[in-house]
Amino acid sequence: MKALIIGGGIAGPATAIALRKAGIDSVVYESHPGGADTIGVFLTLGSNGIDALRTIDADAPALAAGFPTPAIDMVSTTGKSLGRVRTSRPDGDITSRTLKRADLYRAIRGEAAHRGIRIAHGKRLVWAQDTADGVRAVFADGSEEYGDLLIGCDGIHSTVRGIIDPAAPAPSYSGLIGLGGYTRGVPVDAQTGSYRMMFGKRAFFGYVPAPDGEVWWFANLPRPAEPARGELENIGPEQWRRELTELFAEDTGPAAALIRAARAITPAGPMHALPTLPVWHRGRMIAIGDAAHAPSPTSGQGASLSVEDAVELAKALRDRPTIESAFAAYEALRRPRVERIVKQAARINNNKAAGPAGRIIRDLLMPLVLPRLANGEQSRQTYAHHIDWDTTTAAPPRPGTRTHL
Ligand SMILES: Cc1cc2nc3c(=O)[nH]c(=O)nc-3n(C[C@H](O)[C@H](O)[C@H](O)COP(=O)(O)OP(=O)(O)OC[C@H]3O[C@@H](n4cnc5c(N)ncnc54)[C@H](O)[C@@H]3O)c2cc1C
């Protein structure tokens, strides 16, 4: 069996590695000529994502590229503590890590290359279809490839998703834009690896000191109307520095000072999510990772869920007798989990964009509800998730059985 994997971000190479472990060959087709690194952005790889990478023996380079970040302290605009959110497995066995997105891409791609998996760059998929006994993929450069199945790992603005279901919903805009930066020499009230996130008066701000003393920070700014294409790209770092410094001027804490002294500010982008996708697969094609279920970056789970998807899909293809039944079994397993996490992130986004009255209610209620939401069963389900490679993927439920939320 040969799989055509579309997209060489996180889900793509992770899927290729997992398929190789399951005895299935694949080639990864990536549209960017030299990789798909996003400049400068950092992210958290959850303990569940690390655990999934470990299942396919590919966790070491990602661990080496990041630093441990076990929890987040949430504070209000006045610096009042709103509670601590645990972002790792409660047993402390695996701790979530913060790392540059580009470093995570490099780490996973390196593991794929190490196993002899081919990643073809400059290959933008434009069309695909099932044939009598396989699948045909057509690329923008006019070339074609044939395989037994096609896996769309082509991210939140997926082409594969629309080929599988032309009526598929588009990602929704969260009402927030995001950007970040890196600063040295500004003292902060947090220890190395300890996140602090502030619901500021006018915007949301998070920061974490890295082991080398640099402080990594990000800001989420409410923008009710979705920015037009190119609008944010035209705003340079110095203009952001001025706007952000002013935006956080009234908040307690180091936000304004960190922004003023930043050595680098990353480009801003609108924050999107794909809450629910009715059709994940058709025939021999399936969408996984952000292409099927993108949580907003607020969740801190997009990358981790993509790796989990990769492992579960490879297992299902290993265990089920046909591609279609493997896809159905995979969806039944994954849909409830990913949609729960996507919904949680959407709720937090609403709090980030709260108006004056909403802020008062949020600051009163958050210390009461946060411990239950963030450190209880929900958190355990998210961060302690483990995939057992040796168990067999169960048969898909019979048609008509409700399998998702
Ligand atoms: C600012 C920001 C912060 C984030 N923070 C976090 C975080 O803290 N924790 C977390 O877990 N996640 C975070 N995320 C989300 C995370 O980056 C994504 O969930 C994750 O990258 C999804 O992996 P993926 O492989 O599905 O898609 P992607 O990583 O987007 O990869 C898709 C790949 O497909 C390629 N592609 C697209 N179209 C085609 C085509 N037609 N043909 C061929 N190739 C194509 C793209 O070039 C890209 O390389 C954040 C995202 C952003 C933007």
Image (tube, grey):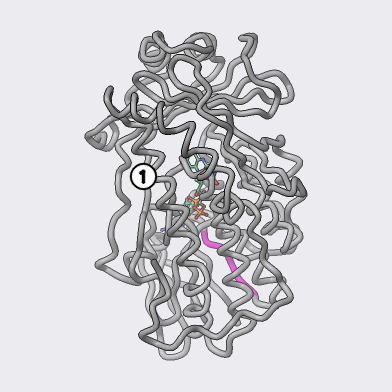
**With respect to residue 163, does 298 lie above or below?**
above
Q: Residue at x 39, y 83 (%)?
A: 401
Q: Residues within 10 Å of mark 1 (few under 14, many from 20)?
A: many
Q: Is residue 227 visible?
A: yes
Residue 231 image-quadrant placement = top left
Q: Position of residue 49 (x, y in %)?
A: 63, 53
Total tally of numbered discs in the picture: 1
Would you name the residue on which mark 1 appears? Answer: 272
Q: Position of residue 23 (x, y in %)?
A: 70, 78
Residue 308 located left or right of residue 175: right
- Secondary structure character of the magenta stretch overall: strand
**With respect to residue 323, does 315 lie above or below?**
above
Location of the C terminus (image quadrant)? bottom left
Q: Is residue 312 magenta?
A: no
> What kind of residue is marked 1?
His
Residue range highlighted in magenta:
25-29
